[in-house]
Image (tube, grey):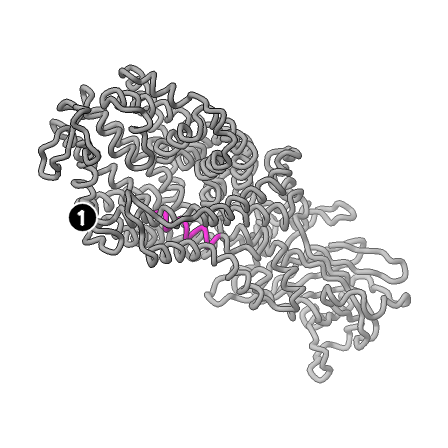
Amino acid sequence: MSRPIKDSREQSIHHTYDNTAFTISYPFNENDVGSCESRTRQDLELKNVTQQSWEASPPGADRRGNTRFTDGNKKHDKLRESATYSGYIALEEETGIGRKPDPRDSVTPRLTLQCNMSLSSPFLTPNGTDGVNEKPTDSQEELEKNGKLENIEPERETWGKKVDFLLSVIGFAVDLGNVWRFPYICYKNGGGAFLIPYIIMLVFLGIPLFYMELALGQYQRCGAINVWQRICPMFTGIGYGICFVATFVGMYYNTIIAYALYYLVMSFRAEVPWTHCGNEWNTPFCVSVVDGYNKSLVTNDTMLAASEYYLFKVLEIQKSSGVEDVGAPKWDLLLCLVGVFVVVYFCLWKGIKSSGKAVWVTATLPYIVLLILLIRGCTLPGAANGVLYYLRPQWHRLKDVNVWLDAATQVFFSLGPGFGTLLALSSYNKFHNNCYLDAMVTSVINCLTSFLAGFVVFSVLGYMALLQGRDIDKVAVEGPGLVFVVYPEAIASLDGSIFWSIIFFLMLITLGLDSTFGGLEAVITAVCDNFGVLRNKRELFVLSLVIYCFLGAISTTTYGGQFVINLLDRHAAPISLIFICFCEAIAVSWFYGVQRFSNDIKSMVGFEPGIFWKVCWVAICPISLLLLFVLSIWAYSGIQLDGYTYPDWSVAIGWCITCSSLICIPLYIVFNIFTTRGTLKQKLVRLLKPASVPGHVHGVNGYAGHDTYEVYPIQNSNTQIETMHANSLPYITNVQMKGAQDNTEITS
């Protein structure tokens, strides 16, 4: 956005229409931090725009002396005698009262007009012409070239290659949940029959939200905080809520990656350490499929060697009695966590220049490993039984409403709307990038990856069920138990177990890192865009953010860290993100306007979204999300972990974590209402309409919105007169001088 030159006390833009000259002057003021950045409507005092007198004089007089504001008090009026006409800029609510312009009033040709827009910057005509004679006027580029304006905001960087962006989005969407959650949810809810509600929820809920965020970020080209100033300022709290969610998730999600790093390091030895029993961490109830699994000796207390390694060696959970007694941090896990955050920092510190290169490895390696594991898994005995169990449809399960809720939840958290990541990543796209195609491609790839992971997982589960002589449903588990117990146990029984262990845990690390990159980039982009001073200090801010998340994650590396992780996993994101996405949907489709949003998309991709997308954005998505939010709260029944029930005080802490992100939305609404000048109606009008327009779309999509001032000249400055102030943006882009004799309108 172009702004007045530094140290300039006043900047004027000159327009000439039909032999009548107008000069719109914008007095310049520095803000409280010494920056020349202009403010938005919330920073603009109404007294500088409305309820003020203006004075007009013939062009021969001195412009700076003749176009000063008067405060209505003749004692302080220091206008020159050559000032011949005056008018009044009224509030929008004042229109319709008072008198109409006197028919005898007229506009003097070559009139010079000044309108005080303190702390605001001019918004030039989109087409760069005078609107009457189609004679080019000073364009924005010419003004910058001539030194009249200065572009003090650096141009936003863009992805070096389109594939960098696609890999980043795919890497974020495809995470650990695709491997350890979807296969379990699928078989539990009817196998192949589950694909019907899953695809329906994907088409009507997941992809529309995914498409909306990609388009929103690409058009507005800013992070999760500033974007709502340009959509609906009342909902700016959404951005702050997203930042809370992302940092909470970053605190425990990276610890899971640290577990995988620990396993990876331990795999570099002659034999993976969870192969046999008889180690110092094993109990008398330990059994190993490698040493011979005797089903007749199995009791309720029997544990696999891989399970005891995970619980008693990696976590040492036996040293903690619960969330009230987590103990001290484990130094080995803490070192692994440090290693993870070091990698995260150096992949994010330079922005998309560094992360765009990292995803070439972290986003592609999981697919290579998945294909290798799929081929190896399908050759194992019992694999066919596992795959059939995974796909066998149970049609009667479709009558269960919980199946449909699980499908909606899985789609929602698999694609990842609401995290702010899609907004952040797409904001670095070129303006005319085909975000529609991106949304379709990445959504389909994400869902196919989940489906592929199901074959990888259940081929191994069928093999493990055969080895143990048990039913597959007794072997199948979800979450960490699948990737840190069942799969390692299967790997230990294979020839070349070291190789299989290395590539498997390397896959888990890369899956997790991609999602971490996306989650933290959402916070970095949002904060740096909102606080411009941090743009040139990105490395320091990223370092501060990484240290903050690391300090919050220390408790997850304690002996009772598993209890902390489970608490955060239940309360940091699930409920909050559903409500955040609900607010996003209504802010865009209801307040900003679905048609206006569709026009924005058309200006980028060349075609307008069809009626299907509009219906989804306006009705289906908001209703579905609100229903999910209500049911999530209604179905909440406390927190349990392996038979341990969390005490009430810990549940209360969990709800405080949830509310810390949710409360940002209503708090910011209240804050804005109290800090915005004007009556309640004026406040609501300003808070429900965009407070600014992105500078890069100037001239691309015509008038994205503008303020109109109809100024009626009168000969008696004491006479009250009404005018209209259609306030949709803080910039004057349309000033209408109405001559009462012929009712001609001159628009600038």
Dominant secondary structure of the magenta stretch? helix
Q: Report x, y in % for residue 75.
A: 71, 84
Viewed as shown, does residue 488 lie left or right of 145? left
- Reading the image, the residue beneath label 1 is 330
Residue 244 on the magenta segment? yes
In which quadrant of the rendered image does the C terminus lie?
bottom right
Identify the amino acid type marked 1: Lys
Which quadrant holds residue 305? top left
Compared to residue 574, the image places residue 203 above or below, namely above
Which quadrant holds residue 715? bottom right
Viewed as shown, does residue 387 lie left or right of 720? left
Label 1 crowd bin: few (<14), some (14–19), many (20+), radius 10 Å: some
Compared to residue 737, the image places residue 569 above or below, namely above
Which quadrant holds residue 212? top right
Q: Can residue 54 be seen in this snapshot?
A: yes
Viewed as shown, does residue 226 lie left or right of 359? right
The boundaries of the magenta stretch are 239-250
Q: Between 592 and 9, which is closer to the camera in this rendering?
A: 592
Q: Report x, y in % for residue 436.
A: 56, 33
Q: Between 554 and 134, which is closer to the camera in this rendering?
A: 554
Q: Can residue 158 be seen in this snapshot?
A: no
